[in-house]
Amino acid sequence: MRSAKNVIGAGVLVAAAICLGTPGIASAGGSAVDEVRWQCGADSVTVRSYAGGPAIPGETIGYGVRVNVDNHNDNVWWHINSPYGGYVLAQYFC
């Protein structure tokens, strides 16, 4: 027989898993996602250290290169975590 403590603990774990798996719930500051996009709007796009911030030296994404977007933020600056970590202008990605 399961104790009430174990049942409540299991319910909390399931609720946490649902929230973390739902885009937008895990991050109140933007739209948390995990999607692959490709650079389709310029010869190259620089990766920024923060939204609107300075470029990170040597971190540019060429035309056709795929990136992994993990947060849409304000839908102007997306945060990526692959091939580099930083911010890119969303308008250059399909």
Image (spheres, rainbow, N blue to C red):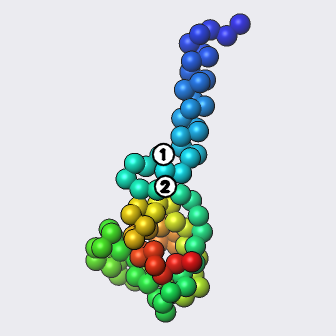
Amino acid type, callout 1: Ile
Q: Is residue 32 above or below residue 52?
A: above
Residue extending farthest right: 1
Assign a secondary structure to mark 1: loop
User: What residue do we see at 30% from left, 73% from top?
Assistant: 52
* Among numbered discs 1 and 2, the one appearing first in the sequence: 1
Q: Is the Cβ of the residue at disc 1 closer than 8 Å to that at disc 2?
A: yes
Q: Is residue 78 visible?
A: yes
The residue that label 1 is drawn on is 25
Q: Nearer the viewer, residue 85 or 72?
A: 72
Residue 27 placement (x, y as % from top left): 43, 49
The C terminus appears in which quarter of the rendering? Answer: bottom right
Neighbor class of circle 2 (other Cα within 10 Å; few <14, some 14-19, many 20+) is many
Write the residue at 53% across / 40% down. Answer: 19
Q: Which three-letter amino acid code belongs to the residue tagged 2?
A: Ala
Q: Residue at x 35, y 74 (%)?
A: 48
* Residue located beneath label 2 in the image: 32
Helix, strand or loop status at disc 2: strand
Between 37 and 62, the one lying in front of the other is 37
**Residue at (54, 43) in percent of width and height:** 20
3D distance between C-alphas at marks 1 and 2: 7 Å
6 relative to 51, above or below? above
